[in-house]
Image: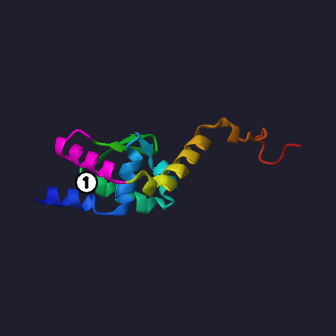
Amino acid sequence: MQDLMNIFKALAEETRLRIIRLLENGELCVCDIVTALDMVQPKVSFHLAVLKEAGFIKDRKQGKWTHYSLDDSDFFRRSLLLSVIERIPKEAVAEDRKRLDDFLQGKTSRDNVVSLPEKKRCAGRCK
């Protein structure tokens, strides 16, 4: 019974529905979701934990980063996810998607990388 309550609790909050809608297109890093939702990381992490506990998402660690994706391994949850995703209008998450797309575009672009001048390693004694 508790499992079923966790499932519906996870779906009963707008932020978590926005996260589900963002993840429908594939795996995202926590920093991607934070940027898309324009929220602080602890708040996003809380919502991700609720979704994970309910079995809707899974995570994968890569170094210090955690990546999240929809977990469609359970038929009941997968059916719920599909039903939920199709009922969330794209307009409801259009701003989230735009922030995410802008962030991801800048994240993959090497044009934003500024090279630093070569520093001598002599603790300030070099001239």
- The main secondary structure of the magenta stretch is helix
Q: Which residues are magenta?
A: 72-88
| Residue 70 locus on image (x, y percent) | 32, 43
Q: Residue furthest right?
A: 127
Which sits in the foreground, 96 or 48? Answer: 96
Q: Residue furthest left?
A: 1
Res 43 quadrant in image? bottom left
In this rendering, is residue 29 above or below 10?
above
Q: Quadrant of the N terminus?
A: bottom left
Task: Tell me what residue is drawn at x 35 percent, y 57 percent.
Answer: 16
Task: Tell me what residue is drawn at x 89 percent, y 43 percent.
Answer: 127
Does residue 73 appear to the left or right of 27 in the view shown?
left
Which sits in the foreground, 102 or 27? Answer: 102
Q: Is residue 83 magenta?
A: yes
Task: Tell me what residue is drawn at x 45 percent, y 54 percent.
Answer: 91
Res 121 quadrant in image? top right
| Residue 56 locus on image (x, y percent) | 27, 48
As shown in the figure, which amino acid type bears the numbered disc 1? Glu
Residue at disc 1, secondary structure: helix
Name the residue that disc number 1 marks.
53
Q: Is residue 119 magenta?
A: no
